[in-house]
Image (spheres, rainbow, N blue to C red):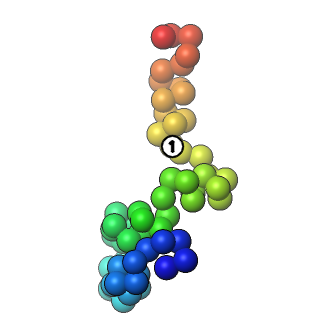
Amino acid sequence: MRLGVPKDFAIGTGMSRKGYWHLAKTLSTNCGLGIEFLQKQGLTSIRTLWIKIHHPAKAR
């Protein structure tokens, strides 16, 4: 909830019997753990790395 997820979503996700893999695609998880939050944590986007490898700037 500190990351901006509504209380109902947080409770529903916390009480879910699904595993973390299935919960990764839920609205509440993506709401709280958005791209900005993950970048602040120092994580790199796999999508960004893929684009740099397959579409280098010199090829444009």
- In this rendered view, identify the residue nearer to me: 17 or 36: 36
The correct choice, above or below, for 41 with respect to 13 in the image is: above
Residue at (55, 77) in percent of width and height: 2
Answer whether residue 14 is visible to the viewer in this image.
Answer: yes
Residue at (55, 16) in percent of width and height: 57
Q: Locate residue 28, reporting x and y percent.
A: 38, 71
The correct choice, above or below, for 45 with respect to 49 in the image is: below
Disc 1 designates what residue? 46
Relative side of 25 to 38, left or right: left
Q: Give the structural element (helix, strand or loop) at label 1.
A: helix
**Amino acid beneath label 1:** Ile
Answer whether residue 13 is visible to the viewer in this image.
Answer: no
The correct choice, above or below, for 6 with respect to 47 in the image is: below
The number of numbered badges drawn on the structure is: 1
Residue at (38, 87) in percent of width and height: 11
Q: Residues within 10 Å of mark 1 (few under 14, many from 20)?
A: few
Q: Locate residue 54, reporting x and y percent.
A: 47, 24
Relative side of 50 to 13, left or right: right
Relative side of 39 to 24, left or right: right
Q: Locate residue 43, reporting x and y percent.
A: 61, 52
Residue at (59, 46) in percent of width and height: 44
